[in-house]
Amino acid sequence: MGVFEKEAILRSAEDQASRLGRSLDYSDGSIEVLEGILELYARYFRENGPDDQKIWNQAVLYGTYLGETLLRNGLADLGYRWALTENGLPVLAKDGRNQMSPITKAEKRIQNGPEDSVKSFYDVAKVIAQGKLIPGRRTGEPGAEELLRRDPTVTIWHRKSGDLERLQVLSDADIIVGAAGLKDPIYPWAKQKAVIIDFGITKGIDGNLHGDISERKVDEVEHQTSVPGGMGLMVRAGLLLNIVDAHKRRRLDGLGSVVTERKPL
């Protein structure tokens, strides 16, 4: 991409949004406005045929705005800054690691429509930056993002969270997903109609395999997956399909993405 002229790009994004009758003010709420702008472009390219260069140009404008809004609303205070990858792609990075690619996300939002919501990206990026979700542990991150696309309230508890916080989270949850890989299973304070999905699998001191969450009586919750015997071959097959798909497209999706080829602006 060459030189990253952030201020000029942001002015162009603001001006273009203004011509569309929208205002971008770098607030958390403006991400909903951004979602609407990108949907206009998604519809345009669906109706008139895709143009990779034009889509990329719009992604640079509005992806830069998305990233800058993240920085101004907390990520800068947590140590994130704009940085260029080896391929010249501007990303948000902290200490050379934990990269997030808002420009790539904006591109995918235009290409794929609402299923690649920038609002979901924004919310999950904030959670990651706060250390509540660690990129690379590939169950929690995509699971949380997938749920956020459907507008529920999603709370992430991790192994270092306190017991009081855990109690507050689990006692009110409709769906509980265990994916921390805990040495000892926890007994969730779950309500009666909760659904418990346990991805964790660890060998206990007795030599037996168990999940993150203790087995409940059948009448205590709506449903609970068993460990072992619950998440197994189908999950592995799904992960392999995702790896093959990522290799074919030569880029990773959304947070922490890397793009191998880009045309100049």
Image: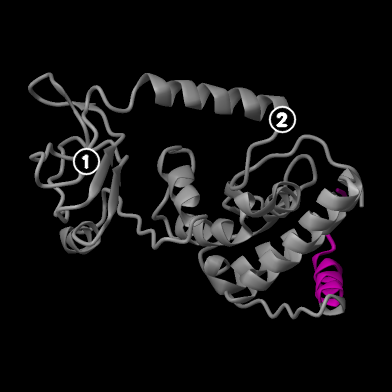
| Label 1 sits on residue | 223
Based on the picture, tell me whether residue 3 belongs to the magenta stretch.
yes
Q: Give the range drawn in magenta.
A: 1-17
Whichever of labels 2 and 1 marks the residue nearer the N terminus, that label is 1
Picture quadrant of residue 33: bottom right
10 Å crowding of disc 2: few (<14), some (14-19), many (20+):
some
Q: Check the image and report above or below for 30 versus 42.
A: below
**SS for dot 2:** loop
| Label 2 sits on residue | 250
Q: Which callout, 2 or 1, points to the residue nearer the camera?
A: 1
Name the amino acid, label 1: His
**SS for dot 1:** strand
How far across and down, in percent of the image, does residue 181 sit? Answer: 28, 36
Is residue 252 or residue 108 the one in the foreground? 108
How far across and down, in percent of the image, does residue 58 sit? Answer: 83, 58
Residue 194 lies left or right of residue 253; in this view the side is left
Determine the residue positioned at 80% across, 59% down: 41
Tell me the distance, in whole angstroms, between the alpha carbons under discs 2 and 1. Answer: 38 Å
Q: Check the image and report above or below for 22 versus 255.
A: below
Based on the picture, tell me whether residue 229 belongs to the magenta stretch.
no
Q: Main secondary structure of the magenta part?
A: helix
Q: Check the image and report above or below for 242 versus 213.
A: above
Determine the residue positioned at 30% across, 41% down: 180
Determine the residue positioned at 16% across, 49% down: 188
